[in-house]
C-alpha cells in the first residue's frame, strides 16, 4: 500500500468517475483502475462498487477512504513541516467560516492577508457548523472559524473574540421607543426574524423560537443583511452580532438596541485539528483577526501571547 494508491482512491471517491479521477491525478484511466484493484487485492476488500453509475464506495471502502484522507493529510503536514523554515509565510491553507461571521470578517481578513502575506494562498468557503466540523474531522480543511464551543477530542479550540448580541428593531415596532430590549420581551414582538437553524448565534436566542406565539410570523435565514431588510420593510426585530454593526449606515445604527437580562454574548473561535503542525499559519490568521477586532473584544490571552499548538 502506498500514498499514491491512497491518493487515487480519494480522487475516485471525489469524482465518482474513473476518467475524471484519472485526469485529476494526471494518469491514464487504466493506470488508476489497476492501482486501485491492486490495493483491493492487497487488503482483501472491495473499495468501490463498480456496478453502479456513478461508482460509489462500499461500506468498508468508505471507512478506508475516511482514514486515507487523514493519512494523506498527515503526510502533507510532514512535508509542510520540512519546508516550514524555508517558507514560513507561504503555502496553502483551506478554511471554513460560519455564514453569520463571514460577512464582516472575510473582507477585512483577506485584505490584511493580501497586503501582508501575498504569497499565502487562503482558500475560504462558508460552511454551516456541522459541515465544517465534519470536514475538519476528515482533514478536508485546515481550520474553521465558528461560534460556540465544539467538544471534540480531535479538534483544538482557540478563542478569538467575544461579542455581544444586539437587537435591530423596525421603526414600525413599538419596542423602537425603548432604550434597551430585555431578552424575555423579544418573543412578544409582532415579528421575530430568526437565523437559520444551522447558524443560530447562541442558545439563549435559539430558545426564543419555541416561545414565540403561534400567530407570530417567522422567516429563517442564514443572511444577516436579508434579516435586516425584512425588518425594515415588514416590522418586528432581529438579532445581530456586535462586530457586524461596525460601519453600518446611520439609518440601521439608529435601530440597534442592546439586549439585557441577560446580555447575550457569543464566543468566536478558530478550530484546527490536533495534528495540524503549521503553527505559523495559525498565528498569521489570528493576527489578521486581531488587526480589526476592537481590543476590548479580543480574547485576553491573544492580546499578549502568540498561539502555541
Image: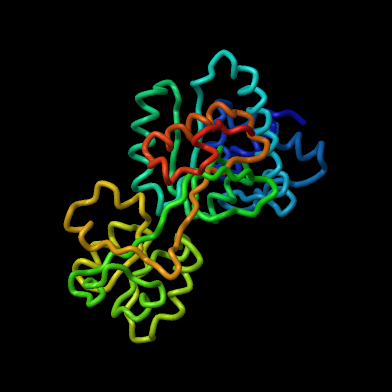
Question: What count of labels does the image hold?
Answer: 0
Residue 289 position in % (x across, y down): 43, 37
Viewer-closest of 59 and 20: 59
Residue at (39, 34) in percent of width and height: 291
Colour mode of the rendering? rainbow
In the image, taking residue 10 as reference, residue 162 lies left or right, namely left
Viewer-closest of 242 and 132: 242
Give the vertical position of 28 relative to 295 (above or below): above
Residue at (38, 43) in percent of width and height: 105
**Residue 159 visible somewhere in the drawing:** yes
Q: Which of the 4 image quarters holds residue 100?
A: bottom left
Viewer-closest of 69 and 181: 181
Residue 251 position in % (x across, y down): 17, 58
Residue 120 position in % (x across, y down): 45, 25
**Residue 23 visible somewhere in the drawing:** no
- If the image is split into quadrants, where does the C terminus sit? top right
- If the image is split into quadrants, where does the N terminus sit? top right
Give the vertical position of 266 relative to 45 (above or below): below
Residue at (29, 80) in percent of width and height: 190
Residue at (76, 36) in percent of width and height: 39
In the image, taking residue 79 as reference, residue 292 lies left or right, namely left
Residue 42 position in % (x across, y down): 82, 36
In the image, taking residue 102 as reference, residue 271 lies left or right, namely right
Amino acid at each position: 500500500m502506498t500514498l499514491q494508491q491512497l491518493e487515487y482512491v480519494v480522487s475516485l471517491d471525489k469524482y465518482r468517475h474513473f476518467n475524471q479521477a484519472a485526469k485529476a491525478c494526471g494518469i491514464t484511466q487504466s493506470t488508476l483502475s489497476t492501482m486501485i484493484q491492486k490495493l483491493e487485492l492487497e487488503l482483501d476488500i472491495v473499495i468501490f462498487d463498480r456496478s453502479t453509475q456513478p461508482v460509489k464506495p462500499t461500506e468498508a471502502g468508505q471507512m478506508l477512504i475516511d482514514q486515507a484522507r487523514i493519512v494523506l493529510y498527515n503526510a502533507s503536514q510532514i512535508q509542510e513541516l520540512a519546508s516550514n523554515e524555508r517558507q514560513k509565510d507561504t503555502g496553502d491553507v483551506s478554511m471554513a467560516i460560519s455564514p453569520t461571521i463571514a460577512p464582516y470578517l472575510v473582507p477585512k481578513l483577506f485584505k490584511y492577508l493580501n497586503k501582508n502575506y501575498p504569497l499565502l494562498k487562503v482558500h475560504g468557503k462558508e460552511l454551516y457548523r456541522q459541515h465544517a466540523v465534519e470536514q475538519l474531522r476528515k482533514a478536508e480543511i485546515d481550520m474553521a472559524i465558528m461560534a460556540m464551543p465544539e467538544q471534540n477530542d480531535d479538534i483544538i479550540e482557540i478563542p478569538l473574540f467575544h461579542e455581544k448580541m444586539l437587537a435591530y428593531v423596525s421603526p414600525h415596532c413599538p419596542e423602537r421607543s425603548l432604550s434597551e430590549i430585555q431578552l424575555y420581551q423579544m418573543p412578544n414582538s409582532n415579528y421575530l426574524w430568526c437565523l437559520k437553524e444551522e447558524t443560530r448565534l447562541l442558545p439563549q436566542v435559539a430558545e426564543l423560537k419555541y416561545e414565540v406565539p403561534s400567530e407570530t410570523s417567522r422567516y429563517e435565514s442564514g443572511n444577516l443583511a436579508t434579516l435586516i431588510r425584512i425588518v425594515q420593510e415588514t416590522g418586528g426585530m432581529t438579532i445581530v452580532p456586535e462586530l457586524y454593526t461596525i460601519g453600518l449606515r446611520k439609518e440601521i445604527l439608529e435601530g440597534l438596541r442592546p439586549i439585557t437580562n441577560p446580555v447575550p454574548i457569543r464566543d468566536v473561535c478558530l478550530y484546527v485539528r490536533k495534528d495540524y503542525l503549521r503553527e505559523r499559519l495559525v498565528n498569521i490568521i489570528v493576527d489578521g483577526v486581531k488587526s480589526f477586532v476592537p481590543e476590548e473584544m479580543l480574547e485576553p490571552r491573544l492580546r499578549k501571547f502568540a498561539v502555541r499548538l
